[in-house]
Amino acid sequence: MATDARGLTTEPAVRVRNLHRSFNKDGGVLNGLDLDIAPGEFVALIGRSGTGKSTLLRALAGLDRDVAGHGRIQVPESVSVVFQDSRLLPWKRVLDNVVFGLRGAGAADRGRKALAEVGLAGRERAWPYQLSGGEQQRASLARSLVREPQLLLADEPFGALDALTRIRMHALLRQLCEKHRPAVLLVTHDVDEAIVLADRVILLDAGVVDTDVRVELTNRSRSDAGFAELRSLLLDRLGVAADA
Ligand SMILES: Nc1ncnc2c1ncn2[C@@H]1O[C@H](COP(=O)(O)OP(=O)(O)OP(=O)(O)O)[C@@H](O)[C@H]1O
């Protein structure tokens, strides 16, 4: 069992043991996967297309009740999920989307604060269609963070954004995670995004963890030698040449 610097037991936020999932009789998508994520740890999940990244995320989110499989999943009580599309309700204004389902007298104030944190102060009464794609993802992040989740699951949240907006969203997500400290599992196709954001990068292959590396870079700039080395290692595991 893991212990902290004082020798006290630290329970992981996420514990997955021997997880199996399959969609048909021909073979499994997840094939006995084990994974621990510590409280406050930011884990990026990469892997070739079809290796089961979204299947794992959906299993952790409890969104796969109809999928065959077995194994043990332990997640915290409060879990939020962010997808590639913001999934804002088009008939609700931005603030109402953010606080949708929240109870308590202070909900609207908490929603306003969350919107301010993601840079959307003043847009509370806008309709979702009046926001750009990046702003919609900001609102979606605010909707997650207002719930103060102990676990944030994100499936390619920046996949549909342009390169500049992506970079801005990276900075915002890091800043929000440093402040709120949820455990994070981020699915991404982008190796650079994984290295820029995560404490740990996990590469999934054939439904199990193939590579599990800690990102111990003080400088997360793409021009840093350590960055390039880690990128090259991960691209190699993905079967892609680093200079391709
Ligand atoms: N609802 C479903 N019904 C049948 N097969 C499915 C379903 N969802 C996923 N699969 C299959 O399971 C495998 C893993 O899919 P998954 O979406 O988890 O992969 P992924 O690693 O997230 O892929 P990508 O990087 O392309 O998004 C794929 O072969 C996919 O076709």
Image (spheres, rainbow, N blue to C red):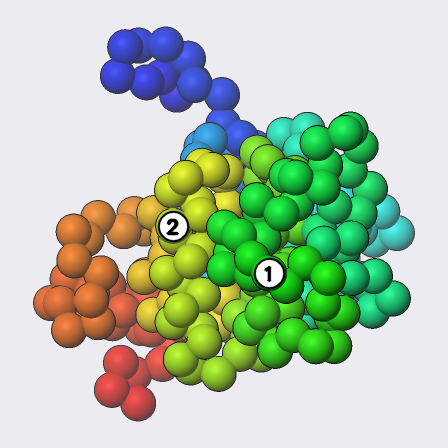
| Residue 93 in sight | yes
The x and y percentages for residue 141 are 59, 55
In the picture provided, is 107 more to the left or to the right than 171?
Answer: right
Where's residue 206, x and y in %? 56, 62
Residue marked by disc 2: 175
- Dot 1 crowding, Cα within 10 Å, few <14, some 14–19, many 20+: few
Say which residue appears at 70% left-offset and 31% top-offset: 106
At horizontal 42% and vertical 58% (from top left) the residue drawn is 172
At label 1, the amino acid type is Gly
Residue type pointed to by label 2: Gln
Query: Can you see residue 20?
Result: no
Say which quarter of the image contains residue 233: bottom left
Cα separation, mark 2 vs mark 1, equals 21 Å
Up the image or down, 133 lies above or below 44; here it is below
The residue positioned 13% from the left and 67% from the top of the image is: 224
> Of 167 and 22, which appears nearest the observer?
167
| Figure quadrant of residue 230 | bottom left
Mark 1 sits on what residue?
122
Q: Using the image as rendered, state which of residue 125 and residue 61 is in the foreground.
A: 125
Task: From the viewer's perspective, tell me whether residue 129 is left or right of residue 38.
Answer: right
Q: CB of residue at label 2: within 8 Å of ligand 1?
A: no
Residue nearer the viewer, 189 or 49: 189
Identify the image quadrant of the C terminus: bottom left
